[in-house]
Image: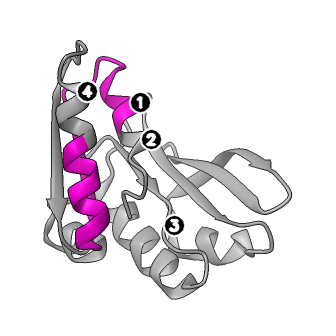
Amino acid sequence: FAGSGALGFETASRSVDEVVMIEKDKRIHNQLLMQHQLLNSYPIHGEVKIIHGDGISYLQRADDRSVQLIFLDPPFNQPNLLLSAAQEAGRVCDDQGRGGIYIECPNDFDLRELSTLLPNWTLIKSMETAQVKAVLFRRSSS
């Protein structure tokens, strides 16, 4: 769900070690690769990987607590993708105080569904526009 790559490229410019963007659509994947080449002349702290593949499958193969911050912005007309991705993100993400799970979803999406899938996570920030809800979850204190 890399989409335009804006979140990933912005994150890469902010002193992170690695950004991985996963995009299933081959056309969009190729556009991301071209954008990455154009941006290579600008200083980026860490490595940017752009993978052609399925984001949920990538998360399913990832180790528990192996990623610090996950951005999820799946197609709004496929809520089951969001639910599947959020559940895997909850397992894979290891928030160490600076990261978490950032999710963009349709404004009318019921956040209780996410809270059920992310029982060890707390919603700490939420904002809404006319069409989009953006939320940030952090791992709950043990």
Name the image quarter holding the N terminus: bottom left
Q: Nearer the viewer, mark 2 or mark 4?
A: 4
Instruction: State the CA–CA distance, disc 1 to disc 2.
Output: 5 Å
Q: Please give left or right for residue 106 compared with residue 95 in the image.
A: right
User: Which sits in the foreground, 111 or 22?
Assistant: 22
* Mark 3 or mark 2: whose residue is earlier in sequence: 2
Residue assigned mark 4 = 39
Question: Which residue is pictured at 40% across the width and 62% down the height?
Answer: 90
Instruction: State the CA–CA distance, disc 3 to disc 4.
Output: 35 Å
Residue assigned mark 3 = 118
In reply to whether residue 66 is colored magenta, the answer given is no
* Mark 3 or mark 4: whose residue is earlier in sequence: 4
Circle 1 crowding by C-alpha within 10 Å: few under 14, some 14–19, many from 20: few
Q: Which mark is residue 82?
A: none
Question: Which residue is pictured at 51% across the width and 67% down the height?
Answer: 118
State yes or no: discs 1 and 2 in contact (Cβ < 8 Å).
Answer: yes
Task: Please tell me in which quadrant of the rendered image residue 28 appears.
Answer: bottom left
Instruction: State the CA–CA distance, disc 3 to disc 2.
Output: 22 Å
Count up the numbered dots: 4
**What percent of the width, then of the height, locates residue 49?**
15, 45
The answer to whether residue 66 of the structure is visible from this angle is: no
Instruction: State the CA–CA distance, disc 2 to disc 4.
Output: 14 Å
In reply to whether residue 21 is colored magenta, the answer given is yes
Question: Which residue is pictured at 73% across the width and 47% down the height?
Answer: 126
**What percent of the width, then of the height, locates residue 54?**
24, 75
